[in-house]
Image (spheres, helix red, strand yellow):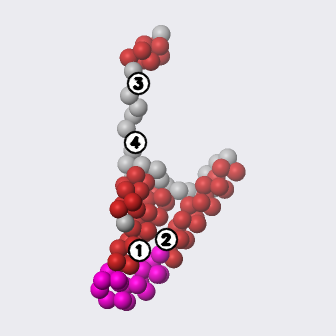
Amino acid sequence: MIYTLGMLIASTRVHTMMTITFFTLFLGFFLLVLGHFGNPVWNVVAGYELMFCAGCAMYMMFAIIINDLAGRTVLPLGKPWIKAAAAVLPEKEIAKKAA
């Protein structure tokens, strides 16, 4: 669960579909823990929820491959939830670009 949480946080900088996929995976693991230590009905709920997660992952991979082969966006993946910080250039690189 810890690795999945880390990947969920990192995926917010990639695109919406990856964030949804890792969120549903994290939720599925959490429901499995509830089913193990609590009421076993949560295992059934986790099973259906993880099937939805698998569908999200399949769509994401279909979209990545089809968009790459088509050279354009055929299946949308969404925008990143958090924008990546701009790269910091060393002073020498800034001077080269200004010249």
Q: Which residue is mark 1?
A: 28
Kindly indicate whether the residue at mark 4 contacts the one at mark 1 (C-beta within 8 angstroms).
no
Mark 2 residue element: helix
Tell which tag, 1 or 2, sits nearer the viewer: 1
SS class, disc 3: loop
Where is residue 15 drawn, in percent x and y?
47, 53
The residue that mark 2 highlights is: 53
Q: Amino acid at mark 4?
A: Ala
Residue plotted at (44% across, 63% down): 22
Q: Are marks 1 and 2 in contact (CB under 8 Å)?
A: yes
Question: In terms of secondary structure, what is the magenta stretch mainly?
Answer: helix
Nearest to N terminus: mark 3 or mark 2: 2
Numbered mark located on residue 4 in the image: none
Q: Is residue 96 above or below residue 45?
A: above
Task: From the image, state whether disc 1 or disc 4 is nearer to you.
Answer: 1
Boundaries of the magenta span:
34-50
The Cα atoms of the two marked residues, 3 and 2, are separated by 39 Å
Q: CA distance from mark 1 to mark 4?
A: 28 Å
Residue position marked by numbered label 3 in the rendering: 89
What's the residue at 35%, 83% (across, down)? 36
Crowd band around label 2 with a 10 angstrom C-alpha radius: few (<14), some (14–19), many (20+)? many
Residue 73, percent across and down? 61, 51
Q: Quadrant of the N terminus?
A: bottom left
Q: Amino acid at mark 2?
A: Cys
The three-letter amino acid code for the residue at tag 1 is Gly
Q: CA distance from mark 4 to mark 3?
A: 15 Å
